[in-house]
Image (tube, helix red, strand yellow):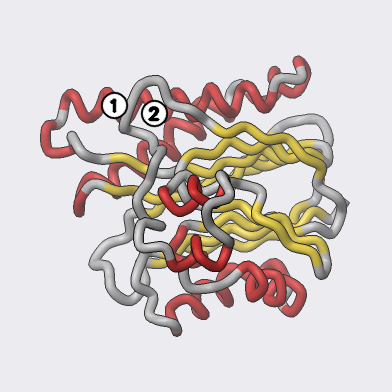
Amino acid sequence: MRLVFSERTDPGRVRPSNQDAYVFDPLCVPGGGALMAVADGMGGYDGGEVASQLAITTLRNHVLPRVEAWAREGTIGQGLTEAIHAANRAILDAQLTHAELAQMGTTITAVIAASGRLYVGHVGDSKAFLISGEHARQITSDHNVAGELLQRGHLTLEEAAIHPQRHVLTRALGVRDDLRVDQLELEWAPGDILLLCTDGLSSLVSLREIQEAANQHDPEALADWLVSLANSRGGHDNITVLAARWEG
């Protein structure tokens, strides 16, 4: 699997620190693959940064030594969900041993790409988009108040985008032990672009603008271009973007 990709994380124009974290690692699976994930921390100056980095580190340490066996057994999706649960437990354990981190938590949107398939594990309101030419869609659901109301049909997309509680999370790592993880599996056609981001991008740049940028810029330049666009509009939050195109 040949991937053309770009990655960038940026504190933005307002926040004094960057509480986002991410990983983009090649994987040793038949045909090639990659682990991609973004996490957006919360819980104060130290807590958010610790939570997001702990989630990404735990995810990576859980996936890398096991993914080859998962590929043989056909259990990649299940394995990714288990890795996210491990990250959640690591954060909960750290809260117990460090009182100053008791309120920390994080979102996570993680994808294992392997043999033309995307295996997605998701908690929170970071996002994954799949872009195919003129067609683009968000493949994750937002676990926040506005996202839940949208899923129930009580809000339109336009109303959800400006809802006053759109930043109030209904699910996150570090909140409870019985975490619900959204698990998806879908095809990844050659030429399609997968884009993961934290809400520092999606709150300032629309899906249509992301799709247009993906068609106008090479994947190697896409993350930089989108982060710069969000910063030009105020950059009021940390911004992380991973973009990858499968060449087949």
**Residue that appears at 31% across and 32% down:** 175
| Structural distance between the alpha carbons of marks 2 and 1 | 6 Å
**Residue that appears at 40% across and 51% down:** 40
The x, y position of residue 158, in whole percent, is 55, 68
Determine the secondary structure under disc 2.
Answer: helix
14 lies above or below 23? below
Residue 93: quadrant of the picture: top left
Q: Which residue is mark 2?
A: 88
Viewer-closest of 143 and 151: 151
From the viewer's perspective, tell me whether residue 190 is left or right of residue 219: right
Residue 15: quadrant of the picture: bottom left
Instruction: Name the quadrant of the N terminus.
Output: top right
The single residue placed furthest to the front in the displayed view is 154
From the viewer's perspective, tell me whether residue 108 is left or right of residue 246: left
Q: Which residue is mark 1?
A: 92
Determine the secondary structure under disc 1.
Answer: helix
Amino acid type, residue under disc 2 in the picture:
Asn
Residue 164: quadrant of the picture: bottom left
The x, y position of residue 147, in whole percent, is 50, 50
